[in-house]
Amino acid sequence: MLLEVRDVAKEYRIPGQRAIRVLDGVSLDVAEGEHVAIVGRSGAGKTTLLNIIGGLDLPTAGDVKIGGESLFAGKGAARRRERLRAAKIGFIFQSYHLMPELDVVENVMLPAMTGETRIPAPRERAKALLEKVGLAARLGHLPAELSGGEQQRVALARALMCRPQLILADEPTGNLDALTGAEILKLLFEVNDEPIACVMVTHSAEAAARCDRTFALDSGRLA
């Protein structure tokens, strides 16, 4: 199993108030190449769960394993998270999170510049990925010179830069119109040379319908 989420809980403590439990014993398995959607109301904890799966946030309890390696348990977990994020996980965010001072090729290259992964000819790979997502004519452009849909295509190419085994997508079509969102979904599911697992948080019924399984997050639990 590529991804194993076991009994993950997350609490936030506000001074003078009782703890707020956002996640309450979430467990989830995702196989290699499988696409899973997580839906639920705003504030249900979907993004929190995705951030924990990606090692960007720490759970109050529970663990996550990617390829059998724990993100949170045991000695050296912080260093292990850094390595796994760089080598096995690609992130796509609703707000793109592109560096405004870098052109699109440089933005796509960023994951390969952390020192955690070694990608041969990274600039050429970045260009090839941008061509795959239909941006061959935009290679020298800055993010501000692109439309929202084009910026999300750059973000998709960046997520694929280090040949990840798992893509974590947080509302990847949330800021896009229906037609552009459909194009991004098509690319997300079809642009990869090899099958890549995906966990997607979405409010879109169309996006969820493209996945192999859909879970609803409610009252801190998956159903």
Image: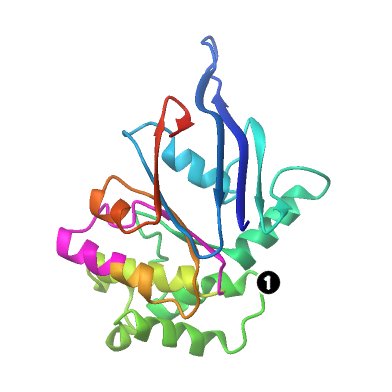
Name the quadrant of the C terminus: top left
Identify the image quadrant of residue 83.
bottom right
In the image, residue 7 sits, relative to residue 192, either above or below, namely: above
Looking at the rendering, in which quadrant would you find the N terminus? Answer: bottom right
Magenta extent: 163-185
Asked if the magenta segment contains residue 182, the reply would be: yes
- Residue 217 falls in image quadrant: top left
Q: Residue 157 placed where, x, y %?
A: 42, 74
For the point 38% across and 82% down, the residue is 130
- Picture residue at 16% right of the left edge, 58% below the top: 177
Q: Secondary structure at mark 1?
A: loop
Residue 49, placed above or below residue 183: above
Find disc 1 in the rendering and name its residue: 115
Name of the residue lying farthest toward the right: 75
> Where residue 201 sits in the image (x, y, percent)?
39, 48
Q: Position of residue 96 (x, y in %)?
A: 36, 60
Camera sees residue 72: yes
Question: Is any atom of residue 151 visible in this view?
Answer: no
Residue nearest the observer in this picture, 214 or 120: 214
Q: Picture coordinates of residue 4 (x, y %)?
A: 62, 48
Q: What amino acid is found at the position of numbered circle 1 in the picture?
A: Gly
Residue 200's place in the image compared with 17, above or below, is below
Q: In the rendered view, does 57 fall on the left or right side of 190?
A: right
Is residue 67 found inside the magenta-colored segment of the image? no
